[in-house]
Image (cartoon, helix red, strand yellow):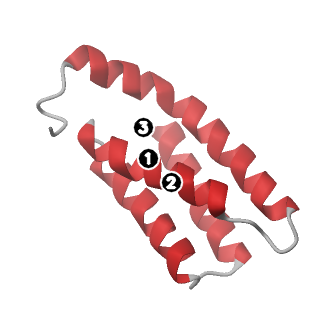
Amino acid sequence: MSGEQVPQALRLRYLASLPGKADEFERVLADALAASPPNWSGLRALAHKLAGSAGMYGYDQLGDRARELVHEIDTRSGSAESLSAQTLALVAALRAT
């Protein structure tokens, strides 16, 4: 099911949930950085969930950003600073949508 097939009422409900998702990303990022070494599992799970749901509701760019974050965590290719910056960019995109 793509965003065009999802009823408008459901798309609007999903849209209304995005600020809360942004808040949750900020909390999970803070928790990840508080651990020593940083624990990215919660952030990965949250990003994976968003990657799956965003596209279904027609928010492909959000899904793509979330998938990139999951990939960077999975491949351990990013530093804590890079993952933080990528997460905060995703938070900004969630708030701007």
- 46 or 88: nearer the eye? 46
Q: Where is residue 45 in the image (x, y as percent from the top left)?
A: 54, 54
- Could you tell me how far apart the alpha carbons at marks 3 and 1 are, in whole angstroms? 14 Å
Residue at image coords 59%, 82%: 76
Find numbered disc 3 in the image and state the secondary structure of the residue it sits on.
loop
Provide the residue designation for mark 2: 47
Provide the residue designation for mark 3: 97
Residue 30 tag number: none
| Mark 3 vs mark 2: in front | 2
Q: In which quarter of the image is the C terminus?
A: top left
Left or right? Give the position of 24 relative to 64. right
Name the amino acid type tagged 3.
Thr
Label 2 close to label 1 by CB (< 8 Å) = yes
Residue at image coords 49%, 26%: 17
Name the amino acid type tagged 1.
Leu
Label 3 close to label 1 by CB (< 8 Å) = no
Q: Position of residue 49 (x, y in %)?
A: 45, 47
Find numbered disc 2 in the image and state the secondary structure of the residue it sits on.
helix
Q: Residue furthest bottom?
A: 77
Provide the residue designation for mark 1: 50
Left or right? Give the position of 87 relative to 49. right
Name the amino acid type tagged 2.
Ala
N-terminal label among 3 and 1: 1
